[in-house]
Image: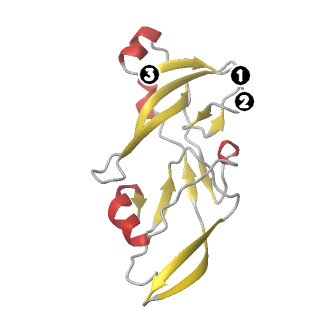
Amino acid sequence: MLGNSRPVGELQIFANCGATIGKIEARAHIKQRGCNHLMEIAMSFRITGLDPIPFRPLYGLANIELARLGVKRCRVDAKPGFPDRVEMRDAEPGESMLLLNYVHQPADTPYKASHAIFVREGAERAYVGVDEAPECLRGRMLLIPTEAATFNEMMSPLITR
C-alpha cells in the first residue's frame, strides 16, 4: 500500500495489448511527503479472454443481419493480425472473424471506453492465464494506470475482490 492509497485487489486485464511474460515489472515514481522515490514493483496477474456467451447469437448470422447490428464478418488472410478476444490467440488464415465494437469500460467516468475487437466466429472457451501472457499479446503494448488512487476511483468496475 502506497501512502493513503487502498489495495486494489485482483485485476483482470481485458486489454487488446501485451504483457511481459511471467511477472509484470512496473516502475513507478512515487511522491510522498515532498520526496520523489523510484520503486520497483513485481505483481502477479491474470489475463482472461472475454466471455463468449454475448457473442454466440452472432455466430452464423447472414452478413446483412450482422451489418444491421454494426458487425462485420472478415476472413483471416494473414497471421498475426486478427487477435481473438475470447480465446486470446491470433486466428489462422481462412478462419472467420467478427469485427465489432465492444464497450470494455462502461462506467460513467472519464475512462468510459469502447473499441473495435475481433471475435473468432464459433469461439466457445475464454482464455485464462495466470502469470503468463498469451502469444497474441506478447510484443503489444500494455497500459496499466500508475496512480492507485485514480485507479481505485475511476476503474473500480474492473476490479474483483
- Crowd band around label 3 with a 10 angstrom C-alpha radius: few (<14), some (14–19), many (20+): some
Frontmost residue, 113 versus 133: 113
Q: Is the residue 61 above or below the residue 15 in the image?
A: above
| Residue 53, quarter of picture | top left
Q: Is residue 110 left or right of residue 82?
A: left
Residue at screen point 54% across, 31% down = 118
Residue 17, image x, y percentages? 59, 47
| Helix, strand or loop for disc 1 | loop
The residue tagged 1 is: 93
Scheme of image coloration: secondary structure
Q: Are marks 1 and 2 in contact (CB under 8 Å)?
A: yes
Looking at the rendered structure, the kind of residue marked 1 is Pro
> Which amino acid is tagged 2?
Lys
| Residue at the image position 59 percent from the left and 81 percent from the top | 38
Q: Residues within 10 Å of mark 2 (few under 14, many from 20)?
A: few
Residue located at (43% from left, 74% from top): 7
Cα distance in 3D space between marks 2 and 3: 21 Å
What's the residue type where badge 3 is placed? Val
Query: How far apart, in angstroms, are the residues tagged by discs 1 and 2?
Result: 7 Å
Residue 35 appears at what percent x and percent y?
49, 89
Residue 49 or 14: which is nearer the viewer? Answer: 14
Which residue position is annotated with label 2? Answer: 79
The label shown at residue 71 is: 3
* Residue 154 coordinates in the image, percent (x, y): 34, 60
